[in-house]
Amino acid sequence: MSKYAVSQHDIGTRLDVFAQAACGLSRNGVQKLIENGDVTVNGDTTKANYRLRHGDVVEITPPPLEETAVLPEDIPLNIVYEDTDLIVIDKPKGMVVHPAAGHPAGTLVNALLHHCRGSLSGINGVLRPGIVHRIDKDTSGLLVAAKNDHAHNCLAEQFAAHTIRREYLAIVCGGFSDDTGKIDAPIARHPNDRKKMAVTPNGRRAVTNYHVAERLGRYTLVRCALETGRTHQIRVHMASIGRAVLGDTTYSNAKQPFNTAGQVLHAHALGFVHPNGQYMELASPLPEYFQRILDILRK
């Protein structure tokens, strides 16, 4: 059982939406848990559309682990840190985190199952063992996975409370008049395209802080620190202010002058409290594809 205290950011959020973000299950999976009484608020069962209030405590009992249907694959991993509780991977651009429609194999989960010999937390079921959070296929950088349920719960609680430090580097189209800024704009599923997200008044609160690291003519290198972790958050927020991430054809119709194979976005730094109680912070250097574009723009 995992316990989550509702933060200021999540006041007014539907219970099913909060639970899905907290445990990483599908929407249908969360709905079943709520119907079965495996999700409670302040110790009581309630409906999926219950709006969370300040001081609420949500408890989630995950479904039992099923026999895994995902096969281990001997795929090389760039391991930044590893111990008996967790593993931090520097994910390459183009790698999908877990199996899904269109990507049944060759994912980070397949690689982790081989490397960890099956020693991964089972909280997120057969398709996402060990996965506490995700980054997009075409986003590179740091991702932490849990090797046991205790570590998973510890990390998931920090993600739910927005205490994990996550800093990204991005090259965006356009310039900025100020060196720093804050985008506080709610994000939800796009009303007309379910594969996209959008800034919408009915969305969940999303906050991105950015700092100009380098001005590059028509482009800008920015550091983005997340206060929240919504799907496609940086990509949606930057596009919403007319500064789409370079190479992001999902949220921009602009011509792409570089062969980027997707957005130029890198999960550069990750900081969290280890299950042993110690704070740790890790950083990833810029990958080759990112550095190549920077070198071109600096000429």
Image (tube, rainbow, N blue to C red):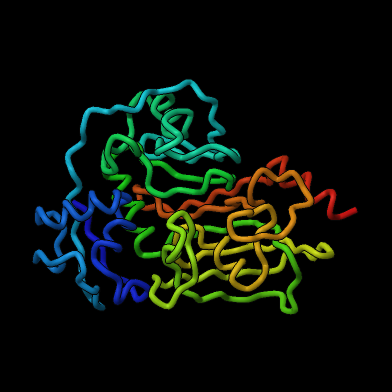
Whether residue 185 sits left or right of residue 86 in the image: it is right
Residue at x 81%, y 65% (from the top left corner) = 218
Residue 175 at x, y percent in the picture? 76, 71
Task: Please identify the residue farthest to the right as the structure is shown.
Answer: 299
Whether residue 161 sits left or right of residue 90 in the image: it is left
How many numbered marks are there? Answer: 0
Vertical relation: 284 (above or below) 129: below
Residue at x 23%, y 53% (from the top left corner) = 30
Is residue 136 visible in the rendered image? The answer is yes
Whether residue 158 sits left or right of residue 135 in the image: it is left
Residue 37 at x, y percent in the picture? 9, 56
Q: Nearer the viewer, residue 140 or 235?
A: 235
Residue 17 at x, y percent in the picture? 30, 62
Residue 293 at x, y percent in the picture? 78, 48
Tell me where residue 69 sits by quadrant: top left
Is residue 229 visible in the rendered image? The answer is no
Residue at x 57%, y 70% (from the top left corner) = 209
Residue at x 30%, y 76% (from the top left corner) = 11
Vertical relation: 114 (above or below) 1: above
Q: Nearer the viewer, residue 56 or 103?
A: 103
Tell me where residue 128 sits by quadrant: top left
Q: Nearer the viewer, residue 261 or 182?
A: 261
Task: Please identify the residue farthest to the top as the structure is shown.
Answer: 74
Whether residue 231 sits left or right of residue 36 in the image: it is right
